[in-house]
Image (tube, rainbow, N blue to C red):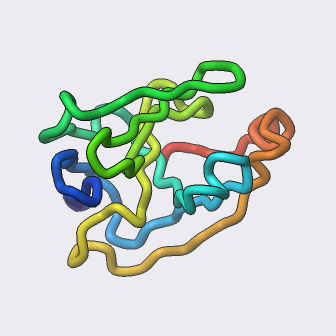
Amino acid sequence: MIKHHGGCHCKRVRFEITAPAHLEVEECNCSICAMSGFLHLIVPADRFILISGAEVLHRYRFNTGTAEHLFCSVCGIKSFYVPRSHPDGFSVNARCLDEGTVESTTVTSIDGREWEKTFAQGRGEFR
């Protein structure tokens, strides 16, 4: 496990996570993930630190209202959020991690359009 840093496009939102150098991420086909190109790196809350930008984050909820989508109000980028699948952790967009610490990335597709079936099968474990 190593420290990775990342954030939004304008750099107002910055965070730190502890995760492996070789990432296993998930690409979801649900409406919001497909439109935004989000690559999910799920981390428990104790391995996520928001360094700056809390004051510029805006929240968006839809469907069940469980997931808390957090967007930078300045540049519009969602670099992380609280997912429905792991409300006690965070999903970080692997595309928003700074260069230099990620050694490799393995992408697995998940069927978020059929969310209940997908997560009933035990998908989306903390890594």
Q: Nearer the viewer, residue 106 or 32?
A: 32
Q: Residue furthest front?
A: 74
Residue at 47% in and 47% down: 42
Name the quadrant containing residue 117: top right
Left or right for 70, reference 98: right
Q: In the displayed structure, would residue 48 be above or below residue 39?
A: above
Q: Nearer the viewer, residue 64 or 43?
A: 64
Left or right for 43, reference 64: left
Residue at 71% in and 25% down: 63
* Position of residue 127 measured from the top left corner of the image (x, y, whole percent): 47, 51
* Position of residue 69 measured from the top left corner of the image (x, y, whole percent): 48, 34
* Position of residue 5 measured from the top left corner of the image (x, y, whole percent): 20, 58
Residue at 30% in and 33% down: 57
Q: In the displayed structure, would residue 29 be above or below residue 58?
A: below
Left or right for 58, reference 3: right
Q: Residue furthest top?
A: 65
All told, the count of numbered labels is 0
Image quadrant in which the N terminus is located = bottom left
* Position of residue 17 measured from the top left corner of the image (x, y, whole percent): 26, 50
Residue at 67% in and 55% down: 28
Name the quadrant containing residue 23: bottom left
Q: In the displayed structure, would residue 52 be above or below residue 76?
A: above
